[in-house]
Amino acid sequence: MKSGLHGAIVLAAVIVLSDASLEIRSQMFNVKTSQDVTQYEKVTSASCELMCVKECVERSHCDSCTYVSDSGECFQNVQTTTAAEGELKVYRKPPVCDQSNAVDYSIFNVTWRSSGQEGDVRCNDDDYIYVEGSPTVYCSYEGLWVKYLGTCRQRIWRNPTGSAIMYRFPLPVSPGWAMCIRGTACPACMKRAFDLKDNGDIYVHMDARFNFTTHVRKLIFNSYVGGVWGSGMTQDAFPFNNGQPFEMEFRLLTWDTMEIYVNSTLTASYTAPVSLASISYFFCSGDAFTGSELQLVDVWSGCDN
Ligand SMILES: *[C@@H]1O[C@H](CO)[C@@H](O)[C@H](O)[C@H]1NC(C)=O
Ligand SMILES: *[C@@H]1O[C@H](CO)[C@@H](O)[C@H](O)[C@H]1NC(C)=O
Ligand SMILES: *[C@@H]1O[C@H](CO)[C@@H](O)[C@H](O)[C@H]1NC(C)=O
């Protein structure tokens, strides 16, 4: 009876069986109480043997177990069988996963810990972030990483080119979200539009008018929702100097208010007529725009990161 036995785990036997070519090392543990497991834990980190003992402790009809290290099998020795406790199982050590098991290793990188039983998943490329999945993955009994449901999405674009650029955010925004744009203001252009939008609506349209129609050095804000432009807002403080570098940050202060910082100074604050929760793309265009004015667009981190 388990309750009649006390003390630390007894390493009852270390049996070496010779079977011609095969040598099987096994350890038998007489299992008594969960305190024994704690004690056992102190002296070894061999998780599989520990698991064998733990499983035995959890079943009152398991009196002892034998762990065979070569096969990784744990045989639980039974004296009486209680149907309610379910079947006794042979515990088998799961194979160790390694990085090459990772799905799409070109994108993901699993840093394994706990001897390959558990891993941290991240994107190989720091310009991408891992989203929509647990950053922790587990090694299955088949030796494959599981809980691998996430994906890598681009958040940083460097040295873009093109007459207009449009970048999608990796995740939906919420207050606290910030994006960073580093660039050099055009030397002799008329206008640059910076839009925060979804597929149809433009929630924040910031038109930097260097010199366009009657506007010289003006920032114009507006929203285009449901096919209609709002009343807009014009601001005299113009944060760009022709041909000079700038660092601009859009920061979502509340669900409807966007702040714009240039060179770390609050330059403008635009409160939109609708919630900004649906913005999911950054779009930039303008006359003679080639994209090459911009060195970096990070749609997921402020300029401090
Ligand atoms: C993947 O992770 C390993 C371990 O941290 C690291 O040594 C390796 O450089 C990483 N590979 C890439 C491409 O980031
Ligand atoms: C704006 O452009 C017009 C011509 O398109 C030019 O005559 C004017 O001098 C410019 N103003 C400034 C402030 O550059
Ligand atoms: C922003 O900073 C850069 C230097 O990093 C400077 O050349 C530029 O003039 C600044 N822009 C403004 C509007 O102060």
Image (cartoon, rainbow, N blue to C red):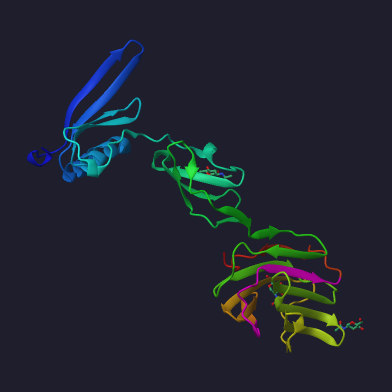
Q: Residue at x 24, y 27 (%)?
A: 27
Furthest-front residue in view? Answer: 83
Location of residue 126 with respect to 272 vertically, above or below: above
Give the quadrant of the C terminus. Answer: bottom right
Instruction: Report whether 221 appears left or right of 58.
Output: right
Depth check, front residue: 72 or 287:
72
**Residue 294 is a magenta residue:** no
Q: Is residue 26 visible?
A: yes
**Residue 285 is a magenta residue:** yes
Whole-percent x, y for residue 72 in the image: 34, 30
Depth check, front residue: 243 or 103:
103
Q: Which residues are magenta?
A: 268-287
Q: Quadrant of residue 186?
A: bottom right
Give the quadrant of the N terminus. Answer: top left
Whole-percent x, y for residue 174 in the image: 56, 73
Q: Is residue 127 visible?
A: no
